[in-house]
Amino acid sequence: MTRFLKNNPFWLLAALAILVAALYWGLLATDRYVSRAHIVLQSPEINPASLNVSSLLSGTSGSGDLLLLKDHLESVAMLRSLQEDLDLRSHYSNNDIDFLARLESADVPIETFHKYMQGRINIVFDDYASLLKVEVQAYTPEMAQQITQALLEEGERHMNLMGQRLAEEQVDFIDEQAQILEKRLYNARDRMLEFQNEKGLVAPAQTIEAIFGTVSRLQAELALLNARIKALSSYQSASSPEIRRLREEASAMEEQIRIEQDKLARQSGDSLNKVSAEYKTLEMRADFALELYSNTLTALESTRIEAARKLKQVSILEYPTLPEYPIKPERLYNITVFALITLLITAILQLIVTVVRDHRD
């Protein structure tokens, strides 16, 4: 056996490595407690018909919001917040922890600390179930649970803060647009009043309808008058006083009809049809400005409500657990995997050495 090991030192090194690994994971490795939580994000609605500012979150919804939350939970900013609340550096650099698993020092740079914590805080996005699975490893059950709870609370606060900031920016923008549309509405109203005063007409359309009625009535009376003149001409002389009087009335009536029709339409000057068209345009602009202003005020109030309320709520499917026994490290699993890999590498190296010896011989 001694000769075999002397001729094959790789197996001796492998045996020593496996022995060291077994001693470390079997006796020296510090127990780690794991706290878990499963969460989803929900957006409570006040009024489905109102403007929904939740969609302002970078255009994301559902899984997109969860990915934003996951990114924040794994960020350096989150780590700094946890450090302020729970003093993670002191916990993970405790001298009671084995030298391979503990943080080098409580004063390590934030980059080193963040890299270390990535091995202790694991956040997985389940695309199928659309939820986040949070898993935190710590060296006491209470600390593991506290870190998990702090992650959920800070994550919810961050998502609401981001949504409310976007909503407040939207409020400022809509408020500015409302002021612009208010001026536009007042200008349109003033132009309409100036036009009415200039033309001396409050409602040109109604004036045109009245003139149409007058012209129609005069034309009907003229038709009756012409019929009467024709009937009298059948038995009276054209120069008779009565026929002359009737013809003068008919002539005056025709002149009045021409005057009334000239008010409605003529080639030059301010005819009523032109005045009515201009007034209609001004009225439509004023109505449109009023509708825009009204819609903007509605959107403004809806957005203010959205900005003031909680936009995102972390719904917990599995609350942060308080571990009862350590499940990390997986001692037997680690020893077995390490031994198999070591033996495999040793066998490959031994095979290479044997091939080289055979070629030399």
Image (cartoon, helix red, strand yellow):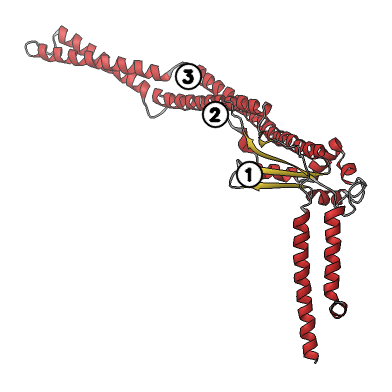
Q: Which residue is mark 3?
A: 199
In the rendered view, would you say 189 is above or below 81? Answer: above
Relative placement, left or right, of 136 versus 315 is right
Q: CA distance from mark 1 to mark 3?
A: 60 Å
Q: CA distance from mark 2 to mark 1?
A: 21 Å
- Residue under the point 65% across and 41% down: 65
Neighbour tally class for label 3: few under 14, some 14-19, many 20 plus, Cα within 10 Å: few
Relative placement, left or right, of 121 versus 305 is right
Q: Earlier in the sequence, mark 1 or mark 3?
A: 1
Q: Earlier in the sequence, mark 2 or mark 1?
A: 2
Q: Which residue is mark 1?
A: 64
Whole-percent x, y for residue 352 in the image: 77, 80
Whole-percent x, y for residue 260 in the image: 33, 18
**Quarter occupied by residue 201:** top left
Relative placement, left or right, of 255 versus 150 is left
- Residue under the point 79% across and 48% down: 120
Query: Which amino acid lies under the numbered mark 1 shown in the image of this protein?
Result: Gly
Q: Nearer the viewer, residue 345 or 298?
A: 345
Front of the two marks 2 and 1: 1
Query: Which amino acid lies under the numbered mark 3 shown in the image of this protein?
Result: Lys
Q: Which residue is mark 2?
A: 48
Count of picture labels: 3
